[in-house]
Image (spheres, helix red, strand yellow):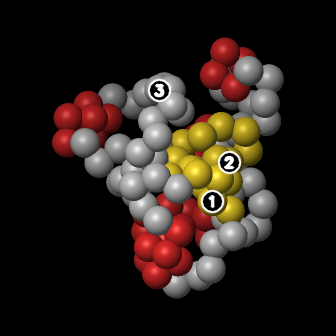
Amino acid sequence: MARRYAYICDAKGRFLEKIWPGSVTVIFHHKENLPKALTDGSDTIGVCMSDDPLVVQLLQHTDVPVAQTSANSSHTVIDYTDAKPMILRTGAISKEELDELLMIVIE
């Protein structure tokens, strides 16, 4: 569903498959089909896929995204608006864990 609203190439999609579901929010450039209220005029949007069983079940029964605040300090936030991901905030998943999981060095 994320590709409906954000520009996510195949390489970035493979990255998401390794980290989701979980406590990682990834920032992408968004497509123009998003309401301005969600983006506040920015050209980016943070996207995450919860690993909470209730949220996963809810999303399996709907075809719309769920908007939430980004104020959750337990989430690691990664900027992937460029060719290489960059950690903006470390949360439940450390930089070292991400480097090992993805077998790349994240800035």
Residue type, numbered disc 2: Phe
Q: Disc 2 versus disc 3: distance between alpha carbons?
A: 16 Å
**Of residues 54 and 69, the one drawn nearer to the viewer in this rendering:** 69
Location of residue 79 by image quarter:
bottom right
Location of residue 45 by image quarter:
top right
Is residue 26 toward the left or the right of residue 80 in the image? left
Please tell me whether residue 58 is drawn above or below residue 75 in the rendered image.
above
- Which mark lies nearer to you, 1 or 2? 1
What residue would you read off at disc 1? 87
Is residue 21 toward the left or the right of residue 89 in the image? left
- The quadrant in which the C terminus is found is bottom right
For the question of whether residue 97 can be seen, the reply is yes
Q: Secondary structure at mark 2?
A: strand
Provide residue 54's location: percent of width, then percent of height: 20, 35
Which labelled disc corresponds to residue 28?
Answer: 2
- Which mark lies nearer to you, 3 or 1? 1
Residue type, numbered disc 3: Gln
Please tell me whether residue 85 is drawn above or below residue 34 in the rendered image.
below
Provide residue 49's location: percent of width, then percent of height: 41, 46
Q: Earlier in the sequence, mark 3 or mark 1?
A: 3
Neighbours of disc 3 within 10 Å: few (<14), some (14-19), many (20+): few
Q: Disc 1 versus disc 2: distance between alpha carbons?
A: 13 Å
Q: Secondary structure at mark 3?
A: loop
Confirm or deny contact between disc 3 and disc 1 (CB under 8 A): no
Q: Disc 3 versus disc 1: distance between alpha carbons?
A: 20 Å
Please tell me whether residue 47 is drawn above or below residue 103 in the rendered image.
above
Residue at point 47% right, 26% down? 68
Q: Secondary structure at mark 1?
A: strand
Residue type, numbered disc 1: Ile
What residue would you read off at disc 3? 68
Q: Earlier in the sequence, mark 2 or mark 3?
A: 2
